[in-house]
Amino acid sequence: SQTIHQWPATLVQPVGSPLSLECTVEGTSNPNLYWYRQAAGRGLQLLFYSVGIGQISSEVPQNLSASRPQDRQFILSSKKLLLSDSGFYLCASAALTEAFFGQGTRLTVV
Amino acid sequence: DQQVKQNSPSLSVQEGRISILNCDYTNSMFDYFLWYKKYPAEGPTFLISISSIKDKNEDGRFTVFLNKSAKHLSLHIVPSQPGDSAVYFCAARKTGSARQLTFGSGTQLTVLP
């Protein structure tokens, strides 16, 4: 099975500051990768997905961007954080029949 | 537009009894359905799945039922245990190469001892 490494586990950032969350995958090659966000009391919303290096699809308009510089690396970024960017961010990788998730990053924008 | 809906935000069940979690979907292009369990501050963990060509899949205490005509699936946990207390997410996947999952909003299950 795959292992998803995601860091940091928690992050407190001021409004207007930049963001970089990193995710790496072990145990597979050429995975489909995803960034999800869970806002307080809500379900998991798909933000971005990538089917290969340099290929990024955005599901919702937002203040964030994603990049995939290497096969098993997926990065979520922002140039200037908003209060509404607070939430629990999850990186995931898809196998044939299921998706594997990282442990998540709790982002609080203050 | 929510394509996957979990209309019950919470459910409480006595230990040893059956827990039934429900999920409805609107997109007939979904061909694969999954249930995930999530504890606070952790990533979701996969529980059980079902293909659209089946109507039932069983794995130990967990059984998932799919009613395609009603666009409805349910997860049965029998017997329920206190350790089952968590948020349960229903997810659906469309045919296609990206294999992205669309999630419901989750149901908080509390199993009372």
Image: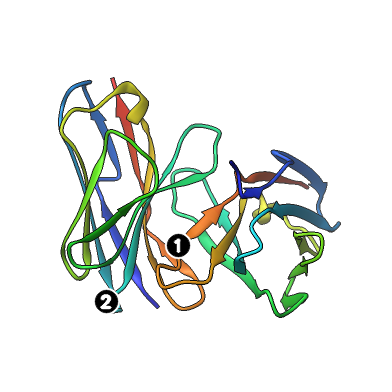
- Name the foreground residue: A80 vs A60: A60
Q: Chain of mark 2?
A: A
Have a look at marks 1 and 2 and say if they share a chain. no
Above/below status of A97 relative to A51: below
Q: Chain of mark 1?
A: B
Residue A36 in the image: x percent, y percent? 40, 49
Residue A52 found in image quarter: bottom left
**Residue lying at 23% horizontally and 28% vertically, measured from the top left:** A81
**Residue lying at 67% horizontally and 55% vertically, measured from the top left:** B84
Q: CA distance from mark 1 to mark 2?
A: 15 Å
- Is B11 placed left or right of A26 in the picture? right
Q: Amino acid at mark 1?
A: Gln
Residue bearing the label numbered 1: B100
Residue at the extreme right: B17
Residue A72 in the image: x percent, y percent? 22, 69
- Name the foreground residue: A40 vs A53: A53
